[in-house]
Image (cartoon, rainbow, N blue to C red):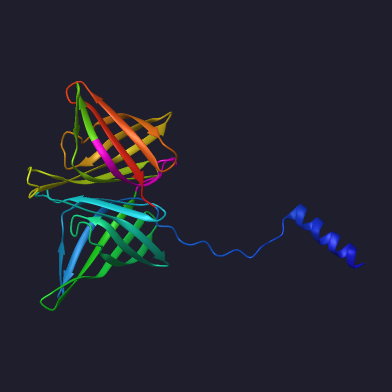
Amino acid sequence: MKKIFIYATLLSCLILGCKKKEKPSQPSQAGAYELEKQVLSRGGKDSTIKRTQIKIYTDNHYMYASIVPDSSVGFGVGTYTLDSNKITERSIYSSRALDSSITSNLEIKTKADGYTQIIPDYATVQGVKYVLTEDYKKFPPADTSVLDGLWKLEKAYTIKGKDTIPTDVKQYKIFWGGHFTFIHRLPRNPEKTKFKNGFGTGTFTFKDDMLREEEVTSNYALLRGHKFAIKIKLNGRDEYTQVINSATNGQSVEIYRRVK
């Protein structure tokens, strides 16, 4: 009788599928978002900040890039952890602190079409506490891609005739669900005492080794609204080379490594 019971149990599992106790799925922040409103509160006074900002979360990294009316560019890229309605972000690189890490504790309120982000300890100046509140709207996701994730530019150069000219720039790029953003900081003089921050963001597709990007927002007017077809060579899952040919500027080559 015991053998019959064991056999019946196994057969039932094969036919109906044995139910296992599964851990409840964790909420996901992954996606691309556009800032709708940003409010800075201090001492009972609220100020609405005019800012164009895009933020992308992958499964474990984030990147934001923004521009204000005076054309100043801000950005940040790093890792994050999500615990219920709280996010802890740890920067890898930012316009505010460069390579120095900053930890930000965010309170998240999820909405049907996006989320609200609150930084209760944004800053304290002369004993006055500043709280930053941001409302984001989520972009519709597109197809996944092998490029999805965070990448760091390892090497860049331009080939003009017989000359190979290295490019001195610090750059990161993030892809997720059909959206991308790049941020960079490059020297404006040989002494490297002056620098320029830049970014670009938009939509992309990747098929047959061809990356097709449409720039939507950027601090560079020449990029906004333009479409690019970029030849990509993958070297495994964690490195790729992109090549852009120009009749006037020669051949631009960039080599990226995946940030883990």
Count numbered badges in the picture: 0
Q: Position of residue 91 (x, y in %)?
A: 28, 59
In the displayed structure, 94 sits above or below 105; it is above
Closer-to-camera residue (30/37): 30
Along the viewing direction, whichever of 122 and 188 lies nearer the viewer: 188
Residue at point 19% right, 60% down? 97
Q: Is residue 207 magenta?
A: no
**Residue at x 11%, y 48% (from the top left corner):** 195
In the picture, residue 162 is in which quadrant?
top left
Question: Is 244 situated above or below 204?
Answer: above
Determine the residue located farthest toward the bottom in the rendered image.
127
Q: Residue at x 30, y 52 (%)?
A: 63
Instruction: Check the picture and name the quadrant holding the N terminus.
Output: bottom right
Question: Which residue sits at x=35%, y=44%?
Answer: 257
Q: Nearer the viewer, residue 205 or 174?
A: 174
Q: Is residue 148 magenta?
A: yes
Q: Nearer the viewer, residue 57 or 108?
A: 57
User: Which image quadrant is residue 169 in?
Assistant: top left
Q: Which residues are magenta?
A: 139-156
**In the rendering, at what x and y percent does residue 222 appear?**
17, 33
> Percent x, y for residue 246?
22, 24
On the rendered structure, is 112 left or right of 186? right
Q: Quadrant of residue 240?
A: top left
Image location (x, y in percent) of residue 197: 16, 47
